[in-house]
Image: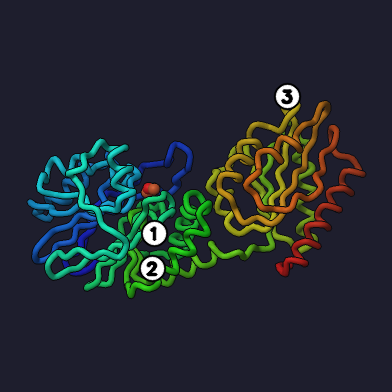
């Protein structure tokens, strides 16, 4: 499939993949977008595919009659893009891997490539393919330290690899449904990019200097209206939060469940939006998406072996790793003896720059005074959201 004159998609759509990094659910599958650029002098392959889909890449190259690749541009060393480079070099021994110094080091570590396999480029350097010119721009920490993008000057296409991508298996190359594109790009940002919000902001500014009309990531849709994804990223990476409380919870015998029900009603009465997630069966990606812009998180837990329920501890661990811009955090829950839940959960959230609101942790099934405490917590959150200008 052609995305610009003599620029072709030769990657692989992975309709069946349901987990990424053995952690992240992929409800819509994903794709490994590899691109072929044919210049009048040289041919370049931009990224490869996950090794499980190597056959698809080679089938595509064969269908385009490719008998020579001069350059394999590697934007990012993670194996879903780099893993087929060794096989490409075997089939096209004249090819050199073009990348930055840091990425070269990682590729040598991960794929056992050799020093002589590489041409190392610097930030802003250009490479001519004859009638087409590639300009390389380093964009570190989206989401690894070596990440970079390539700008194809003559056709004004920006190849961004993971940056601005989405986990979406689709038969169309360009966005054909903006709602689905937004949701999958937000899930992707939440799960992979959110911890790097600040470097991403800088890199967004850096790439804006390039006059592109198409953004071609290495996962999901290609954007022929790039402002769509740039606007979304500007919002997600900003400091803005929404008048929203996330309530991920686990209840073993119904006491915590009752607290969640009462608390959620109290929030709704105060015009605060709520997203609740029963951790016994929630897709972690849904929580990650909500973390992108929710102002407050209140975890709900039963007691297990004197501590929080392991599902809640796991959720807290993931929240901490994703470093959302959450402003307020708290805990509600029920225990019977030796409750260490508050200290335990606090200890799992050192990365959160959020104010801790007084938890409501009670003995047994909630009673009248406990309902009052939950209403008071809802009052506090309403006051905090008002003071933050979001309610
Ligand atoms: Fe799509 Fe970071 O690899």
With respect to residue 190, does 223 lie above or below? below
Question: Looking at this view, is 10 or 87 the one in front?
Answer: 87
* Mark with earlier residue (2, 3): 2
Coordinates of residue 38 in the picture (x, y in percent): 14, 62
Q: CA distance from mark 1 to mark 2?
A: 8 Å
Circle 1/circle 2 CB separation < 8 Å: yes
Does the beta carbon of the residue at mark 2 sit less than 8 Å from ligand 1? Answer: no
Query: Where is mark 1, residue-wise?
Result: 139
Question: Looking at this view, is 313 or 148 the one in front?
Answer: 148
With respect to residue 18, does 263 lie above or below? below
Is residue 231 toward the left or the right of residue 176 in the image? right
* Mark with earlier residue (1, 3): 1
**Which residue corresponds to the image point at 48% horizontal and 53% vertical from the top-left?**
193
Q: CA distance from mark 1 to mark 3?
A: 46 Å
Residue at the extreme right of the image, as rendered? 369
| Mark 1 secondary-structure assignment | loop
Check residue 305 in the rendering and tell me which mark sits there, or answer none.
3
Is residue 134 toward the left or the right of residue 283 in the image? left
**Which residue corresponds to the image point at 74% horizontal and 47% vertical from the top-left?**
330
Q: For residue 5, which quarter of the picture? A: bottom left
Q: Nearer the viewer, mark 2 or mark 3?
A: 2
Check residue 207 in the rendering and tell me which mark sits there, or answer none.
2
Coordinates of residue 379 in the picture (x, y in percent): 83, 58
Quick check: can you spot residue 202?
A: yes
Is residue 185 toward the left or the right of residue 322 in the image? left
| Picture quarter with the N terminus | bottom left
């Amino acid at each position: 499939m052609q995305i610009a004159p003599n620029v072709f998609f030769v990657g692989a759509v992975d309709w069946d993949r349901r987990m990424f990094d053995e952690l992240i659910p992929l409800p819509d599958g994903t794709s490994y977008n590899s691109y072929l650029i044919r210049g009048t002098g040289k041919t370049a392959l931009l990224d490869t595919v996950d090794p499980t889909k190597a056959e698809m890449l080679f089938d595509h190259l064969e269908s385009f009659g490719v008998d020579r690749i001069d350059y394999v541009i590697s934007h990012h060393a993670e194996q879903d893009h780099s893993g087929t480079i060794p096989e490409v070099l075997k089939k096209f021994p004249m090819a050199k891997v073009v990348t930055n110094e840091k990425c070269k080091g990682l590729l040598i570590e991960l794929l056992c490539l050799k020093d002589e396999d590489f041409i190392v480029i610097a930030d802003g350097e250009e490479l001519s393919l004859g009638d087409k010119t590639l300009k390389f721009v380093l964009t570190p920490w989206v989401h690894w330290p070596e990440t970079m993008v390539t700008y194809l000057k003559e056709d004004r296409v920006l190849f961004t690899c993971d940056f601005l991508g989405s986990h979406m298996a689709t038969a169309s190359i360009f966005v054909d449904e903006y709602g689905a594109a937004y949701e999958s790009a937000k899930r992707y940002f939440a799960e992979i990019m959110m911890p790097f919000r600040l470097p991403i902001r800088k890199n967004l500014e850096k790439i804006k200097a390039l006059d592109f009309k198409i953004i071609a990531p290495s996962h999901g849709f290609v954007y022929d209206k790039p402002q769509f994804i740039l606007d979304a990223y500007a919002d997600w990476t900003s400091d803005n939060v929404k008048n929203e409380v996330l309530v991920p919870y686990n209840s073993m015998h119904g006491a915590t469940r009752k607290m969640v029900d009462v608390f959620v009603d109290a929030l709704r009465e105060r015009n605060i939006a709520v997203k609740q997630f029963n951790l016994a069966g929630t897709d972690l990606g849904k929580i990650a998406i909500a973390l992108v812009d929710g102002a407050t998180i209140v975890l709900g837990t039963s007691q297990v072996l004197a501590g929080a329920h392991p599902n809640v501890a796991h959720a807290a661990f993931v929240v901490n790793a994703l470093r959302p811009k959450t402003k307020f955090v708290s805990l509600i829950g029920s225990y019977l003896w030796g409750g260490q839940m508050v200290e335990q959960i606090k200890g799992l959230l050192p990365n959160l720059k959020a104010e801790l609101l007084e938890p409501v942790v009670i003995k047994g099934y909630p009673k009248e005074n406990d309902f009052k405490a939950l209403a008071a917590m809802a009052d506090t959150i309403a006051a905090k959201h008002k003071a933050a200008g979001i309610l």
